[in-house]
Image (tube, grey):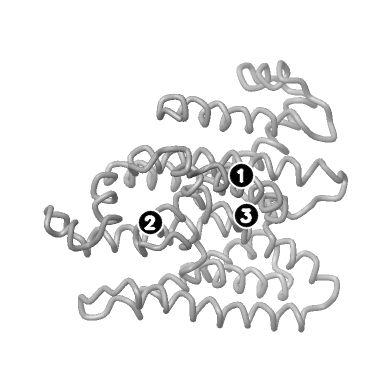
Amino acid sequence: MSRPLLVILLSIAGAGSIVLALVVGTYPISVLQVIETIVAPAPGVVHDVVWQLRAPRVLAAFACGGLLALAGALLQVLLRNALADPYVLGVSGGAALGALVAMLLGAGDTGVSFLALAGALGSIVVVFGLTFRGGDWNVYRLLLTGVVLSAGLSACVSLILVLAPQAQVKGMLFWLMGDLAYAGSPVYAWLILAVLTALAVAQGIRLDLLAAGELKALSLGVAVTPLKLAVFFGAALATAAAVTLGGAIGFVGLMAAHAVRLLGVSHHRALLPLAVLLGGSLITLADTAARTAWAPQQLPVGVLIALVGVPAMLWLLGRRN
């Protein structure tokens, strides 16, 4: 598939997923009504449903998917490992532990978000502190540290689930499977997504060289260590923002960049923004289905994204020579 056509299709998919999510719900709203309330907001039921209920959640879903896709693409370059995903650094485990502790203590949504962010940032500090010592940066130590930390945090999360009162377990499990029902303001997430995507695209050529190998990148004048540090912190920040916003949503960070590569794009200047569009669209559509398919019961968005995304990814893999 040609790159311009792919850009057009994914841009339409991104915009279409947002519009569809604003339209679909238990209260019926037409596309024309959505456009009217966006262009010329006027007090009324449609305005309140769109701007106070659906728009914040829809924008949070798209930002969450875009951040996870960006983090996954960056980590696959940093670790030079096709199986790298945003949770390999232990950031998700730290955020999950912080969020579950807040729920166990009876904290509100703000407290859950704050402790989730604190746990994610704490994991980043631990992984970086154990990996980067005396100016020595080792990718394999980074990967091993992240995996070991993730295992320890996962054990702590399991312990909390066992000890938690029965009434709180369902909410904890929803958060662990991805839940955007209580997502906070998406403004900061969109800001982080825009800045990180712009910076990563600006370094696209250097990322291509780094993906080809450190020695090749060094021979062509790339400052490898500063670039790897920037990629590490960029991916960690994107993951922390996404997990704090929507919980532990899997699959997108691992597969979004691969799906774009299977469609014929390999250079990171194009791959990164396309992966962001694809990831954002997938999470937005999955969250729309999660809140409407079994209404008024809401389903975990992480489960739906895997149920839809896995067959699509297998189809792409099957048709590729």
State if disc 2 and disc 1 touch (CB < 8 Å). no
Amino acid type, label 1: Trp
**Image side of residue 214 versus residue 81, left or right:** left
State if disc 1 and disc 3 touch (CB < 8 Å). no
**Which residue occupies 51% across, 47% down?**
256
Residue 191 percent across, percent down from the top left: 45, 44
State if disc 2 and disc 3 touch (CB < 8 Å). no
Q: Look at mark 2 in the image and give the residue it sits on.
A: 234
Q: Quadrant of residue 51?
A: top right
Q: Look at mark 3 in the image and give the residue it sits on.
A: 246
Q: Nearer the viewer, residue 132 or 252?
A: 252
Q: Earlier in the sequence, mark 3 or mark 2?
A: 2
Residue 213 percent across, percent down from the top left: 25, 60
Q: Quadrant of residue 214?
A: bottom left
Q: CA distance from mark 3 to mark 2?
A: 18 Å
Q: CA distance from mark 3 to mark 1?
A: 27 Å
How packed is label 2: few (under 14 Cα within 10 Å), some, or many (20 or more)? many
How packed is label 3: few (under 14 Cα within 10 Å), some, or many (20 or more)? many
Q: Look at mark 1 in the image and give the residue it sits on.
A: 315
Q: CA distance from mark 1 to mark 2?
A: 31 Å
Q: Quadrant of residue 74?
A: bottom left
**Image side of residue 107 versus residue 81, left or right:** right
Q: Give the SS element for disc 3.
A: helix
Residue 289 percent across, percent down from the top left: 75, 42
Camera-near label (3 vs 1) is 1
Amino acid type, label 3: Gly
How packed is label 1: few (under 14 Cα within 10 Å), some, or many (20 or more)? few
Q: Earlier in the sequence, mark 3 or mark 1?
A: 3
Q: Earlier in the sequence, mark 1 or mark 2?
A: 2
**Which residue occupies 50% across, 43% down?**
320
Amino acid type, label 2: Gly
